[in-house]
Amino acid sequence: MSYRILVEPTAAQRLRTFSSHVVQRLGRLLAELADLASIAPPPSLMFARNPGPEANLLRVEVEDVTVWYRVDKREETLTVVEVASGADDRPDAQAG
């Protein structure tokens, strides 16, 4: 059985700002990762570890969107913690 996917409120709010195409691709990728986590718990997913908002988070990228998430073996969940876009680092992205 696949792990449940949870999305923290701030990450959900940020996801709503992206095109439906990107969100759908992220959703499919996260579903695949949740399936993989149920077969091969986090220690096997070391390839995805990357410094981010928290050292224990995993990271995945789709187009210019980066998603940081954690996998909880005990709770059998994959939780999306933070979402960022490459545009966030560009000066023209800070309009207003």
Image (cartoon, rainbow, N blue to C red):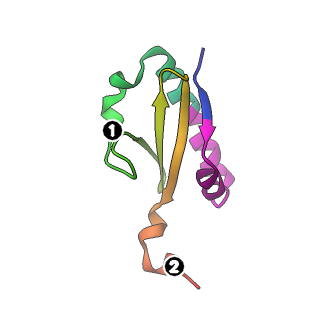
Task: Find residue 17 and report its horizontal and vertical position in percent.
Answer: 65, 61
For residue 59, above or below residue 66: above
Residue drawn at x 58%, y 30% is 31
Left-right relation of 89 to 43: right
Tell me the quarter of the image containing the C terminus: bottom right
Q: Which residue is mark 1?
A: 49
Instruction: Find the residue positioned furthest to the front.
Output: 74
Give whichever of discs 1 and 2 has the lower sequence position.
1
| Count of residue discs | 2
In the depicted view, which residue is nearer to us: 1 or 27?
Answer: 1
Residue drawn at x 51%, y 51% is 82
For residue 62, above or below residue 38: below
| Magenta stretch: includes residue 35 | no
Q: Residues within 10 Å of mark 2 (few under 14, many from 20)?
A: few
Left-right relation of 34 to 21: left
For residue 88, above or below residue 18: below
In the depicted view, which residue is nearer to us: 89 or 25?
Answer: 89
Q: Which residue is mark 2?
A: 94
| Magenta stretch: includes residue 23 | yes
**Residues tagged 1 and 2 counted as in contact (Cβ below 8 A):** no
Tell me the SS state at disc 2. Answer: loop
Residue drawn at x 61%, y 58% is 14
In the depicted view, which residue is nearer to us: 32 or 3?
Answer: 3
Task: Find residue 45 and report its horizontal and vertical position in percent.
Answer: 36, 27
Tell me the SS state at disc 1. Answer: loop
Residue 7 occupies quadrant: top right
Q: Amino acid at mark 1?
A: Arg
Q: Which span is picked out in magenta?
A: 6-30
Q: CA distance from mark 1 to mark 2?
A: 29 Å
Of helix, strand and loop, which mostly describes the magenta segment? helix
